[in-house]
Image (cartoon, rainbow, N blue to C red):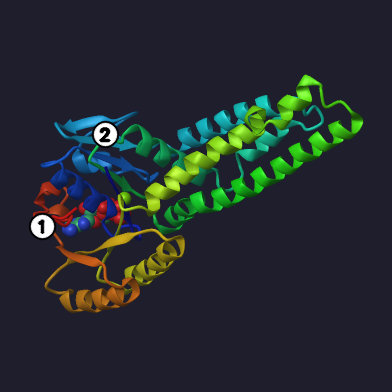
Amino acid sequence: MKILFFTGKGGVGKSTMAAAAAWQLSRKARVLIVSLDPAHNVGDIFGVAIGNGKKRFAETLFLSEVNLQKLSREYLEQETNVLSTTYSYLKTLNLDTYFSVLKYSPGIEEYALLTSIEKTIRDDADFDYIIFDTPPTGLTLRFLALPKVTITWIDRLTQIRRQILEKRYTIHRIRGTLSSEETILDYKEADDDILKRLTTLSNNYHALDGALRGDACHVVLVFNPDILSLRESQRLVEGLRELGLPLRLLINNKVTAENKEMAERVEHRMKIAAGDVLLERIELSKTLLDGEKGTLYDIQQRIIPESW
Ligand SMILES: Nc1ncnc2c1ncn2[C@@H]1O[C@H](COP(=O)(O)OP(=O)(O)O)[C@@H](O)[C@H]1O
Ligand SMILES: [Mg+2]
């Protein structure tokens, strides 16, 4: 299975390129395209309503749109359940108040998105290609950064939890209550619910982090022959590098005879920023611009290199 992320500034053609790539790849492989952008348009591009779950568009092509609001709500509910069970003994802390505030906390959307990517990669591993159409740059970088941040936190929390268990064990030993069943159970790491939960989370995030950093992952950056798009793409390249995520393809989209010179200049700058990365140039399709007549099938140029 290969995972592709289409990233770039709003309006450069991420969704269009992701859809065209999905369509082209589906001629030789099983493809799932997942829209993560709250402003979904993959359904519009293919001219179908996607709804919940996966929609089969062709024999080997499936479409899906992530409902970010619903997902955030589910994510919070699930975490609420886990936490209120785990911490049911904490009578002094009012968990209800905590959770009603938590839904306004920054980062919930990013976590919900990440959880959905993790689940898709796990559950839909039988696809040859999973293509993610991502939201505009900022949100994308923030959620792609999360596995690393989260793993750091989980490691630290695990350490703290171990210290707590260790201290509890010592206290019981001093008091001579070591033989009580509770103490012995609490000391065994495998029997501590909190540690178990931390281990599960750690495993899931390590798996996701591995998938994002590994050979299977391909980040595609779409840009246009203009300065604003260049600037934002340069920042994105920098962000991806900091996160250690594999940028493997640059797409210079909407090139015309008129903007060819600008296109070359922007490509030159992007090569300096990104180094030795494949580059495709996709022409502006006149019929595609004319929404009434144009369809995505008008894009004849190959989007994804043959070798992928
Ligand atoms: N190669 C192209 N030729 C003509 N129009 C294009 C091309 N690529 C994208 N577009 C048009 O540009 C607009 C923005 O594209 P879209 O894929 O929605 O961008 P994004 O997902 O990056 O916001 C759409 O109207 C789309 O039809
Ligand atoms: Mg889009």
Identify the mark nearer the N-term, 1 or 2.
Answer: 2
**Is residue 295 visible from the viewing direction of this image?**
no
User: Residue 24 at what x, y percent from top left?
Assistant: 13, 47
Query: Quadrant of the image for the N terminus?
Result: top left
For residue 235, side relative to residue 249 (left or right): right
In the image, residue 158 above or below residue 224: above
- Mark-to-mark CA distance, 1 and 2: 27 Å
Q: Is residue 301 above or below residue 237?
A: above
Specify the label residue 301 is tagged with.
Answer: 1
> Is label 1 in contact with label 2 (beta carbons under 8 Å)?
no
Residue 2 in picture, x, y percent from top left: 27, 46
Residue drawn at (61%, 45%), measured in percent from left and top?
105
Amino acid beneath label 1: Gln
The one nearer the camera, 224 or 278, is 278
Number of the label disc, if any, that sits on residue 126: 2
Please tell me which residue lies in front, 185 or 290.
Answer: 185
Q: Residue at x 77, y 29 (%)?
A: 90
Q: Residue 186 falls in which quadrant of the image?
A: top right
Name the foreground residue: 13 vs 274.
274
